[in-house]
Amino acid sequence: MNDIARIIDITKDAELKTIAEKVSNNTRLSFDDGVMLFEKGSLPFLGALANFVREKKHGDITYFNRNFHIEPTNVCVFSCKFCSYSKLYAHKEEGWELTVEQMMNIVKSYDGKPVTEVHIVGGVHPKMTLPFFADLLKAIKAHRPELHIKGFTPVELDYMFKKAKMTVEEGMKFLHEAGLDSLPGGGAEIFHPEIRTQICEDKVDAEGWLHIHKAAHQLGMHSNATMLFGHVEKYWHRIDHMERLRQLQDETGGFNTFIPLKFRNKDNDMSNINECSTIEDLKVYAVGRLYLDNFNHVKAYWPMLGRQKAQLSLGFGVNDIDGTIDDTTKIYSMAGSEEQNPAMNTAELVTLIKQVNRKPIERDTLYNVVTDYSLKEVDLASLN
Ligand code: V47
Ligand code: SF4
């Protein structure tokens, strides 16, 4: 009996058996299947099924990349209740805003280091406009043309485009021409308005978020998609979120990676909500892997999850654990991330992946292989 037949065989529940058969036959799961997986699927069942798909797509390969983050500002005009930045607009003395020169100094501090990507994301500061960010993009490309710039969520973009009186298509083209290569996955949260009005009512809505990603895809740019889970949403809101992503992906094929983000409750206006369990985290990765059949990659963002849970996630559908993030990333440590110092060097990442018998591959943003650490003996001590 092969692996999938064994999974189907051990399932007593007829409905879950049907879902497992669909996965085995490459048949797309329906909305109700997705909800049922959350309602009835045990962790071992979901894990076995998600791992089957993960290994069919990628074998043991586990990707990571070498990147660094720039957060232009922590001031934000919006007031997402889960966000530890949101109160800063009223308390500007606690805020920072970087000039183009200061951000270029961060870029230059990586000169000679083998990073392939810069990830730029932050709050929405009213003075940081489209021309300001276009100048930043041009300056980065002039200094280091091969560095891939992944930057700005639709929340930031929607605000800049409106302020510049540009359409989404015009604004995206303008930034792309200035040097923006791809979009990160942030700002998606939970798309359904029933939840959005409770947790982030004043920022771009689901249609606006999807429109901006679609415009980027139509320019040939790739992007990621996140989902903030484990707060006030129900199972069906998660599936509704994934369904909207799956539909856009069918249309454009522009998404690289799905990144579930676990809600953390430190120092924000939702601190009264308990964080969900590790079991729930793993279930979300698994259902994400099963439902989003047209996404190539599922990523665990390890600074939020912690190193050990990131290792565990590799058996639940995850095939990417993000990158060597520098400790300048404040948004997560402020919200109570597992890692007080979210930085890991290449040797640590490679070791982490090898410890759970997976194959570490350093990738660039578009999943081209940079170095296959599974093929050769690497002197880990020599890596930075
Ligand atoms: O959209 C904010 C989340 C996101 C909290 O594309 C929180 O490669 C949990 O999108 N608890 C921004 N999460 C980060 C993001 C991201 C991260 C890593 C990689 C990529 C990528 C994208 O951070 C926001 C929001 O969902 N966030 N506050 C919190 N309290
Ligand atoms: Fe602003 Fe983003 Fe925080 Fe919302 S999540 S308040 S848009 S920084």
Image (cartoon, grey):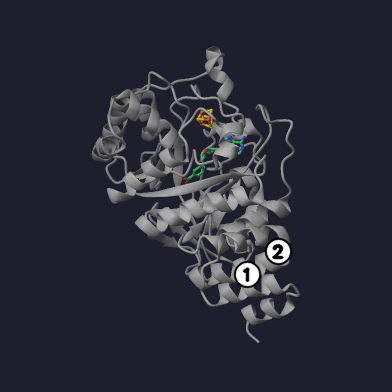
Q: Which residue is mark 2?
A: 41
Name the residue located 47 percent from the left edge and 41 percent from the top edge.
Answer: 206
What kind of residue is marked 2? Answer: Gly
Label 1 – label 2 distance at C-alpha: 10 Å
- In this view of the protein, can residue 105 be seen by the observer? no
Number of the label disc, if any, that sits on residue 49 = 1
Q: Is residue 350 left or right of residue 155?
A: right
Residue 228, image x, y percentages: 58, 43
Label whose residue precedes the other's in the sequence (1 or 2): 2
Label 1: few (<14), some (14–19) or many (≥20) C-alpha neighbours in 10 Å: many
Q: Report if the CB atoms under discs 1 and 2 are less than 8 Å apart.
A: yes
Residue 364, image x, y percentages: 39, 54
User: Up-down: is 202 above or below 244?
Assistant: above
The answer to whether the beta carbon of the residue marked 1 is less than 8 Å from any atom of ligand 1 is no
Name the residue located 63 percent from the left edge and 33 percent from the top edge.
Answer: 335
Q: Indicate the quadrant where residue 197 lies.
A: top right
| Viewer-proximal residue among 118 and 156 | 156
Number of the label disc, if any, that sits on residue 303 = none
